[in-house]
Amino acid sequence: MNLVVVDGYTMNPGDLDWSPLTRLLPSTIYDHTLPQQVVDRCIDAQVVVTNKVVFDRRMIERLPKLRCLGVSASGYNIIDLQAAREREICVTNVPAYSTRSVAQMVFAHILRFTQEVDAHSSSVRAGVWSESHDFCFWNSPLIELQGLTLGIIGFGQIARAVAEIGRAFGMNVIFYLYRRCMDAPEWAEQVDLRTLFAQADFISLH
């Protein structure tokens, strides 16, 4: 059984070790693959791993040995699922691989807006604080998150992780979901979209 990774650079730009994978199966790993290169590179593969390279019906039909398509991402919209189903090809993804990282990035941006850390750091390095007559130096208002409202659109795994961090900061958490959410925590209020836009100080789209 042969494995081909068609766009490995997205997963491993050089700082990771492929050997746990290559020990399992004879493997060929390409950093990038153009659409016109897919068939030639995957023609003998039973297992293919892709991140953003599309496998539509036409592509799947040209790979007779293919038995498994692994998507190294949370979404699987790059795969024609019906075509894979007709061929009994297993399709896998990794829905929770980046949940905490994305939630952390959301709050990195929120704190960037509220604390202006980079601007204050640049001012300090430029000597502005040392020239200030006041010890409590600041050049823009600092906004406290406690008591502000975080509006979240969507309420999947990443959105829930964002909500938990918001709650830890003392924020009020509201969210919109197109259907009734039956398992939301009691501290997160489901609202309609108009209410979310009206009440939220920050909106995170998921």
Image (cartoon, rainbow, N blue to C red):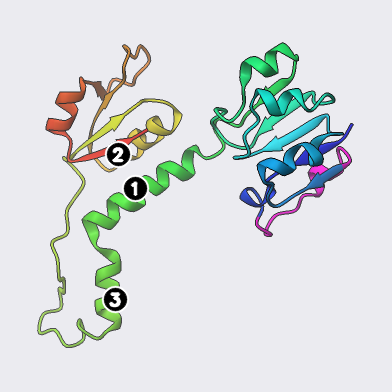
Q: Is 32 part of what is drawn in magenta?
A: no
Q: Which mark is residue 41?
A: none
Three-letter amino acid code at disc 2?
A: Gly
Instruction: Judge left or right: residue 61 versus residue 108.
Output: right
Question: Around disc 3, counting alpha carbons within 10 Å, would you say few (fewer than 14), some (14 to 19), or many (20 or more)?
Answer: few
Tell me residue 21's x, y (percent): 79, 42
Question: Circle 2 sits in a helix, a strand or a loop, which is it?
Answer: helix
Q: Pointer 2: what residue?
A: 166
* Left or right of 32, for residue 39: right
Q: Which residue is mark 1?
A: 107
Q: Going from the N terminus, do you reach mark 1 or mark 2 first?
A: 1
Q: In the rendering, at what x and y percent does residue 88 appear? A: 75, 14
Magenta stretch: give its range: 13-26
Q: For marks 2 and 3, give the one nearer the viewer.
A: 3
Q: Which residue is mark 3?
A: 122
The answer to if 22 sits in the magenta stretch is: yes
Sequence order check: which comes first, mark 2 or mark 3?
Answer: 3
183 over 114 or under it: above or below: above
Residue at image point 22% right, 55% down:
114
Relative vertical location of residue 127 with respect to residue 121 in this rendering, above or below: below
